[in-house]
Amino acid sequence: MVNLVSGTQTSTLDLKMRDTDMQGKLVFIVGGSAGLGLEIGKVLVRQGASITIFARDAQKLADAKKEIQGARVGEDQGVEVVVGDMSCADTVHTLLSAQPTLPDTLYCVAGGASTELGFIVDLDPEAFERSMRKNYYSSLWPARWVLKEWVEDDKRKREMGMGMWKDGMEEEGGKGKEGKERKIVLVNSTASLVPAPGYGSYTASKLAQRGLAETLRLECTRYTTPLSTYTTQCIFAHNFISPTFLHEQTLKPALTKRLEGSTASTLNQLEKQFPYAAQIAPELVKAVARGDFAVVDGRFESQLCLAVGRGASPMRGWGVWDSALEMLGWLVWPWVRWAWRRECEGDAWRVGEDGKGK
């Protein structure tokens, strides 16, 4: 697209970047040295954010830093890299405690199945343990540390201005509308929505991560005040081309490839079927900005996986009773979901007549 005023070309990507303003925000990205994490980092710096990425490979981090710096829109934007294994609780505590500033947003992107693909009976026990470390603990420990520090930060501010904080809680009903936005984004997979043979180790760990995201979605609302709004979101990423994906293609069972439609044997053929990480990162970041808990890209397959993944298990018997219950759930559960959220909002700050938490 050509800008008629300046005569310069404006890419569709640049236009998408303007839809969201991250000016002055600090984002931590766990697993931001390659693939989708790297591309998300580049998208966010184009929106004005400063970035700190955490990963295990020092050389990949150095290369990623150069790429992300090249995407900045201002020299005042910081791009920092930290080497470490973020699946280890002690390492996470040490590395994050050393950071001079708390983030506004945490993206947990680390994970994959580079050495854990195969049928369950064919995998070594260590494969399942690796999957949990790579795909679950690498999200759990950073998310837990950051959430805890955010809450402590708000507590300190609350103690410094208790009267104003109390008035705000009464006026806003416990919802922080003018304060900081604190956001945790866990990058999951459509494999946790529609499990397939050959992904057993990976899917189980991603289901654990999905459960973490669902739980944090509600627990975060406990801490929302006029000082801060806490949210958790979950990206269900569908197949996309990256170095990890191409490596996984060499390890996937033939059955798995047939089921997911990735039987193509050349990169050129795969490119006709699947987008690159750089192509889906902008729309995922844009969707995160819209605020929905569940985030997918615009592909029909991704949308369909989300639609059926809310309950992909087979029905019992002929399915008549389960179908009736599904209809009932469709009518009732939105109210239950609202009631649960309402009950959780501000819970951490409520006090009883005895001055203690309810």
Image (spheres, rainbow, N blue to C red):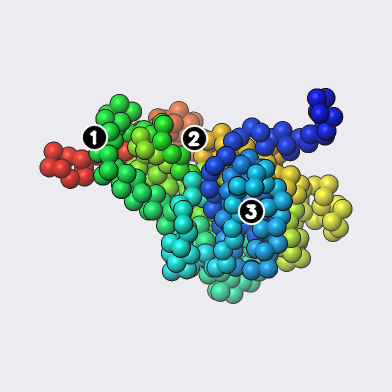
x and y, in percent, of residue 146 in the image: 43, 54
Q: Nearer the viewer, mark 2 or mark 3?
A: 3
- Is 162 left or right of 100, judged from the image as shown? left
Quadrant of residue 171 within the rendered picture: top left
Identified at 32% across, 33% down, the residue is 174
Residue type at mark 2: give it.
Glu
Q: Along the polypeptide, which appears first: circle 2 or circle 3?
A: 3
What secondary structure is found at the residue carrying circle 3?
helix
Residue at image position (30%, 31%) is: 168
The residue sitting at 84% across, 59% down in the picture is 265
Taking 338 as reference, is 118 left or right?
right
Percent position (x, y) of residue 131? 56, 65
User: What residue is pinned by disc 1?
Assistant: 163
Q: Could you tell me which quadrant the C terminus lies in?
A: top left
In the picture, the disc for residue 326 is 2
**Can residue 97 be seen from the camera position used here?**
yes
Compared to 3, does 124 lie above or below?
A: below
Q: Is residue 121 visible?
A: no
Write the residue at 46% across / 57% down. 100
Between 61 and 79, the one nearer to me in the picture: 79
N-terminal label among 1 and 3:
3
Pinpoint residue 254: horizontal percent, then vertical percent. Answer: 76, 61
Residue 191, relative to residue 254: is it above or below? above
Query: Which residue appears farthest toward the left when viewing the image?
Result: 354
